[in-house]
Amino acid sequence: MRFDELRGLVLLLATSVAALWLAATNQLQLYIHPRYVVPTAIAGLIMVPLAIAAARYAALPAAADAPRRKGRWPVIAARASFVVCAFGVVALIATKPAALTSATATQRGVNSAAVGSAPGQTRAPVSSPLFGGQDYSNFTVKDWASLLSQTDDPDFFAGKKAAVSGFIVADTQDPKNVFYVSRFVITCCAVDARPLGVPVYQPGWQDRYNQDQWVEVTGIFDANPSSLSQVTVAVIADSIKPIPQPERVYDY
Amino acid sequence: MIKGPVRAAGYLMAGLAFWLLLTRSFQDVVQYSLPNKLQDLVTLMSSVILESLPFIVLGLVLSVVVQIWLPDRLITRRLPRNPFLRRIWISFIGMFLPVCECGNVPLSRGLMVQGFSVGESLTFLLAAPILNPITIITTHAAFPNDPAILWARLIGAFVIANLIGWLFSRQRNQESMLVPAFVAVCKAHDHTQRARKPARSLQLFARESNNILPALFVGAFIAALIQVLVPRSILYEIGSNPVWSIAIMMLLAFVISICANVDAFFALAFSNSFTTGSIVSFLIFGPMIDIKMLNLMRTTYRPKVLAQVSVVVALASAIIGLVVQYAF
């Protein structure tokens, strides 16, 4: 039996075994929305015995086999496909499960896809009922990011206390003095993750903390003292405490 | 006694499990970390594959059921004979078989073996991801105050799917639009060997896996690579322009390769940054044509057909987006 005849089943087995292991160790949520965890695990459970059973018949003589394509490009394409599939199997089976990093957050732009974040977009005035009578004490990164995208009036935010947790992403304009406490929000799986964050003004933060490190920040909002950063308001931190990466790394 | 292939599969399974235990056990002892971009490439590619697994499984199983267990041409016999009415009926098959678009590819292969023409299979492939109850519910839930978005999506999908079906039904040589491997599959299909259905089911399952899974892996890799390499800020800066926003949202849909069942919630995040027309174009174009889908469809249709379909779908989606933008 040639390997080509089994490659689909090998990929299916690798995916199913990885899905089952990740589901059993509660790490499938690093890749997909929790609503898909059970269906994915069930699919894995069904596929493992089915793929093994199907292997017996994978090499049966086929009236359905088409003549192989000849030429250099089909060979190159086949080899490239093999390399990519092998990479995928290694990614699923051998690499340590991990959430998306600050590289993706920076590449996608923290808060760039938040509601109301488009350049030149008219934001709601502070007098709007949108901003009245809310309890901010339990606001998360997602809540603050949404509010920040609606208004960046320092007077509105002045004095408001923030207590948020997330991973550190350096501000692109003033990385030495400003960082974001960030979380990814996903809809379906990691591929659609949007980074949201709360800006924190903390000069020299890189001496004590690393990018991608999970922290809990408490502080008070005020006008951003940084002259380089484009963010107009930021949390002036009175406490930055490193924390372990939580089990639920994404927001939904 | 276990035969050779089953033994080989068993060893393979044991090997995978052992390797998994080995690498996972050592991960706590041997601390290592990949560079961030490489790590994210791994995470993104894995997320697409894992998220697609249940839908691929469903599509493969349904394809086997349709090809092996249903009486020959059962579905095609119940459809109207008039080609125009047939395509209209086919557009709504997704209402009864709500499989994600990646699962629809193996199912459409099964339907073609059952007698669907190339045009009819394309109508099914393009309509089913959108004209199904789950997508309708989630689109309404994401845009409850914008019924125009939901209706534009549904009507647009119906029109485009039937337009494509009509265009490709005019091609006389249907086989010339299919890859040789699939033409051979269709010709070899034989419903007379009823006594060996379980064996034939497993054989077909193995063959379909061989076609679909490598395509899924390659599509996932390309989608992940583009996301890691191309800054998204470039896209966001022109979101407010009525014409460019449509092009950018369609490009985003092509790259993101997100399932139609939930793409409305993803699009919702852009609803204040991008025009309504561009949101509609995203919601129509994405489920029909994206990196993952094109790679899966490559297992069945020739590249020229895929290019033609992509161009027509893109143009039609853009036009519908512009109409919505200026009419509502």
Image (spheres, coloured by chain):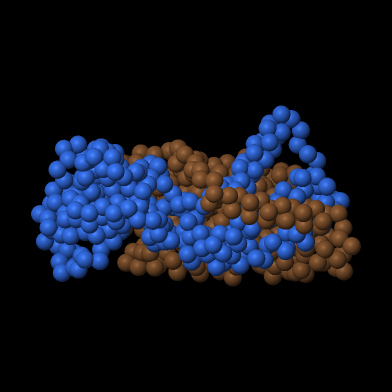
x%, y% of residue A251? 38, 60
The chain letter corresponding to brown is: B
Query: Which residue is more in the foreground, B170 or A248?
Result: A248
- Quadrant of the image occupied by residue B106: bottom right
- Quadrant of the image occupied by residue A252: bottom left
Query: Which residue is more in the foreground, B16 or B190?
Result: B16
x%, y% of residue A79? 68, 36
Q: Is residue B264 visible?
A: no
Above or below residue A71? Residue A3 is below
Quarter of the figure that contains the C terminus of chain B: bottom left
The chain letter corresponding to blue is: A
- The reply, left or right, for residue B208 in relation to residue B271 is right
Disc tally is: 0
- Could you tell me which residue is drawn at 35 percent across and 68 percent down? B144
Query: Which residue is more in the foreground, A140 or B296?
Result: A140
- Could you tell me which residue is drawn at 75 percent across and 36 percent down? A69
Above or below residue B50? Residue A227 is above
- The reply, left or right, for residue B323 in relation to residue B84 is left
x%, y% of residue B77? 72, 68
Residue situated furthest right in the rendering: B1
- Quadrant of the image occupied by residue A206: top left
- The reply, left or right, for residue B188 in relation to residue B319 is right
Quarter of the figure that contains the N terminus of chain B: bottom right
- Could you tell me which residue is drawn at 69 percent across and 61 percent down? A48
x%, y% of residue A64? 81, 50
- Could you tell me which residue is drawn at 61 percent across and 50 percent down? B23
